[in-house]
Image (cartoon, rainbow, N blue to C red):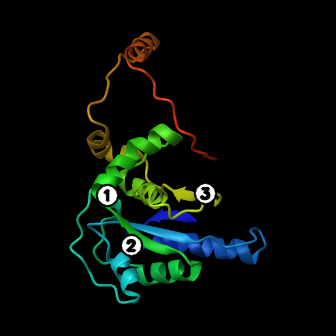
Amino acid sequence: RVFVSVGDGCIIDGVWKGFKDMYALGWIDRLPKLVGVQAAGSDPLVTAWERGTETIVPVAAQTVADSICVGIPRDGLKALRAVRESGGRFMRVGDDAILAAIPRLAQEAGVFVEPAASAAYAGLLALAEAGALDPGETVVVIATGNGLKDVAAAMRAVGAATQIEPTLAGLAAALAQEPVAEPSQVGTTA
């Protein structure tokens, strides 16, 4: 499965086209299922998916994930068709889950993302916690937005940051004061 945060639908449609091209060229032997993840306050594609329709009803979008805060998706129909063709699904995650996924992804995989990018990871976490994933399946999360795009949201997600003097001695002193968390077993590849 490939988890993709979705606003307008452009990225998930492009990802699907890329996979189909790779399959046609024989570079991959099967196509993945796409999981389109939208923020709960900006979820017109999830609603259309749930209703089994291609009619996308506009919403007054509101979410902390501003890069996917879209009330009328420009490529919504293409996104719906791509997910259906892949045998995948759409799902929604709340702003609390999106914010909670930012530090978790940073701690477990060393990836610092903005809220819109963490939505895809929040979707993975939600399905994993619900037992809706096969433990043996390969899962990819596409995280397109760097956390520096929205540092304020990251600060909301983690709370007050430790400030250190920008020297090796300052780093050593900070590390001596706070225990370093051990990352969980998350497989990542570059």
- In the rendered view, does 140 fall on the left or right side of 56? right
Question: What residue is shown with label 2?
Answer: 8
Residue at 42%, 59% in the rendered image: 126
Callout 2 crowding tier (Cα within 10 Å): few <14, some 14–19, many ≥20: many
* Residue 134, horizontal then vertical, whole percent: 59, 62
Q: Let me know if residue 190 appears in the view.
A: no
Question: Would you place residue 120 above or below residue 20 in this image?
Answer: above
Query: Farthest right residue?
Result: 26
Q: Let me know if residue 166 appears in the view.
A: yes
Q: Given the image, on which type of amino acid does mark 2 rest?
A: Asp
Q: Given the image, on which type of amino acid does mark 3 rest?
A: Pro
Q: Marks 2 and 1, Cα distance to the nearest angstrom?
A: 13 Å
Query: Farthest front residue?
Result: 131
Question: What residue is shown with label 3?
Answer: 135
- Considering only order in the chain, which callout, 3 or 1, is on the residue closer to the N terminus? 1
Secondary structure state at the residue bearing disc 1? loop
Secondary structure state at the residue bearing disc 2? loop
Mark 2 vs mark 1: give the one in front.
Answer: 1
Q: Marks 2 and 3, Cα distance to the nearest angstrom?
A: 31 Å
Question: What residue is shown with label 1?
Answer: 65
- In the rendered view, does 143 fall on the left or right side of 157? right
- Considering only order in the chain, which callout, 1 or 2, is on the residue closer to the N terminus? 2
Q: Given the image, on which type of amino acid does mark 1 rest?
A: Ala
Residue at 39%, 41% in the rendered image: 103
Question: Would you place residue 78 above or below residue 95 in this image?
Answer: below
Mark 2 vs mark 3: give the one in front.
Answer: 3
Q: Marks 1 and 3, Cα distance to the nearest angstrom?
A: 29 Å
On residue 100, which mark appears?
Answer: none
Q: Are marks 2 and 3 in contact (CB under 8 Å)?
A: no
Among the 4 quarters of the image, the one containing residue 53: bottom left
Q: How many marks?
A: 3
